[in-house]
């Protein structure tokens, strides 16, 4: 139903796009030669453990000082950075380093990576620099290093503060380390903190959810990403469900828990600005707004996606091929949306935002089919029309995915 903080739009289920013929990797940077690129994303694939709900590309690496994979990966990533910088004179405003578990990366490799980013000038104009973190891997030395290179936002995967629910998710961390990680970040000068929480976990009660919200709010975050548990295909959690070893929360319970999150965080002064994201005033995640507003962004590292002036592609999600292909790693899923599909996708993304789609942008572009759907949803109370925007109603938030799919 809801998506995580770093979820990107997917078009694999959308039949209305024109695939690009596979291009030579050396030609890809030309897409961006004259384009403004707002956001930069780097994917660090290493994790200490693969959580059973996670479908992001990651590799278990429990011996980062021994097997050499981190060294080879950073060498390849720096090669990709330098290669793209040769062809693209752009000034990203946001940088998000995700994974995987970026804070599992060794400190000496962080120094090399950050030095390479600074050398090509990509840190010169950054306003928001986010690093994802597992609470177990946050240390004072690492946070001081990151803050010293401009990191000003930390996104911590808490998911739950209940040990039994973390075990259900196969999430390996001590809940007590979440507030410790937050304080470590603040001590290093990183005051902008996001916490990820999951609800609708099998076995989770209303009281469990309230305790999780209590514990999260006690940490004093500036941003919260709260999303319902999704049984993504090919994950260990989905296989458990298929084998009857775990039962998903029913839809009524999921809606009740989402409603509780909305009302609790509103009462705490958070702005609900996207379906699954809340922020203190002035602390919306600018990088993720890059995705939701369909701006240009460049992704580096295995599995990272890019969007530049309507063209999309992603790096292949294979570490060995990524390293071997340096500085031009193999790419896939090349596509160019048709004008109609591009509008449908932009409408879908804007409706994820609580503010909705501006009417002065929307009205001239609405075709008869989508206009009929909008009128029907307005009649059903699933959409609201203000003087300036079309947006999901509170009722519409609970069926957002199904509703938005009809407008693609």
Image (cartoon, rainbow, N blue to C red):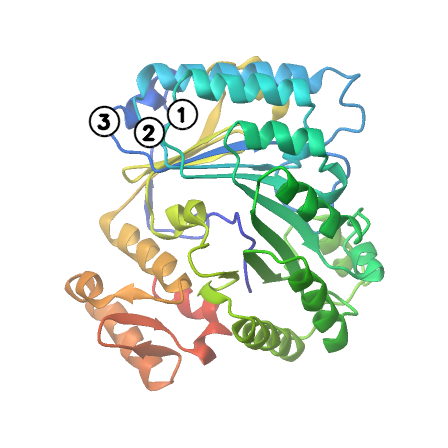
Across and down, in percent, residue 103 comes to: 67, 33
Closer to us: 372 or 219: 219
Q: CA distance from mark 3 to mark 1?
A: 16 Å
The label number, if any, that marks residue 296 in the structure image: none
Across and down, in percent, residue 50 comes to: 74, 41
Q: Which mark's residue is nearer the viewer, 3 or 2?
A: 2
Across and down, in percent, residue 403 comes to: 42, 70
The residue that label 3 is drawn on is 34
Q: Are circles 1 and 2 on residues that touch, CB within 8 Å?
A: yes
Q: Which mark's residue is nearer the viewer, 3 or 1?
A: 1
N-term-proximal mark, 3 vs 2: 3
Closer to us: 316 or 183: 183
Q: Label 3: how many residues lie within 10 Å, few (<14), some (14-19) or many (20+)?
A: few
N-term-proximal mark, 3 vs 1: 3
Is residue 323 among what the camera can see? no
The residue that label 2 is drawn on is 91
N-term-proximal mark, 1 vs 2: 2
Q: Residue at x 30, y 52 (%)?
A: 341
Element class at badge 2:
loop
Q: Label 1: how many residues lie within 10 Å, few (<14), some (14-19) or many (20+)?
A: many
Image quadrant assignment for residue 108: top right
Q: CA distance from mark 3 to mark 2?
A: 12 Å
Q: Quadrant of the N terminus?
A: bottom right
Q: CA distance from mark 1 to mark 2?
A: 6 Å
The residue that label 1 is drawn on is 122
Question: Does residue 232 lie above or below 143 as drawn?
Answer: below
Question: Does residue 139 lie above or below 226 as drawn?
Answer: above
Closer to us: 387 or 234: 387
């Amino acid at each position: 139903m809801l998506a995580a903080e770093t979820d990107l739009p997917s078009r694999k289920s959308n039949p209305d796009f024109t695939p690009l013929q596979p291009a030579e990797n050396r030609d890809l940077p030309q897409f961006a030669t004259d384009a403004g690129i707002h956001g930069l994303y780097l994917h660090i694939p290493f994790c200490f453990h693969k959580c059973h709900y996670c479908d992001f590309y990651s590799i278990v690496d429990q011996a980062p000082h021994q097997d050499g994979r981190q060294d080879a990966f950073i060498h390849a990533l720096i090669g990709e950075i330098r290669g793209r910088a040769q062809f693209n004179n752009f000034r990203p405003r946001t940088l998000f380093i995700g994974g995987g578990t970026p804070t599992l990366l060794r400190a000496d490799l962080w120094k090399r990576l950050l030095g390479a980013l600074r050398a090509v000038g990509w840190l010169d104009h950054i306003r928001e620099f986010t690093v994802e973190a597992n609470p177990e891997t946050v240390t004072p030395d690492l946070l001081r290093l990151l803050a010293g290179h401009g990191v000003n936002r930390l996104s911590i995967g808490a998911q739950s503060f209940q040990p039994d629910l973390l075990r259900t998710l196969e999430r390996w961390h001590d809940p007590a380390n979440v507030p410790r990680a937050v304080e470590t970040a603040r001590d290093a000068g990183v005051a902008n903190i996001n916490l990820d929480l999951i609800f609708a976990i099998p076995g989770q009660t209303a009281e469990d959810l309230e305790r999780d919200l209590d514990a999260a709010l006690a940490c004093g975050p500036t941003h919260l990403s709260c999303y319902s548990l999704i049984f993504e295909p090919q994950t260990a959690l989905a296989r458990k469900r298929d084998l009857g070893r775990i039962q998903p929360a029913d839809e009524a319970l999921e809606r009740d828990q989402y409603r509780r999150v909305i009302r609790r965080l509103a009462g705490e002064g958070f702005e609900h600005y996207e379906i699954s994201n809340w922020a203190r005033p002035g602390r919306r995640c600018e990088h993720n707004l890059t995705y939701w507003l369909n701006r240009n962004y460049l992704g580096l590292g295995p599995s990272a996606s890019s969007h530049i002036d309507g063209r999309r592609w992603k790096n292949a999600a294979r570490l060995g091929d990524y390293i071997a292909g340096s500085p031009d790693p193999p790419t896939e899923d090349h596509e160019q949306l048709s004008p109609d599909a591009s509008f449908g996708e932009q409408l879908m993304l804007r409706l994820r935002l609580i503010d909705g789609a501006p009417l002065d942008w929307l009205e001239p572009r609405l075709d008869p089919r989508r206009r009929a759907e909008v009128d029907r949803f307005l009649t059903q109370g699933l959409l609201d029309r203000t003087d300036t925007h079309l947006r999901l109603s509170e009722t519409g938030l609970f069926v957002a995915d199904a509703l938005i799919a009809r407008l693609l």
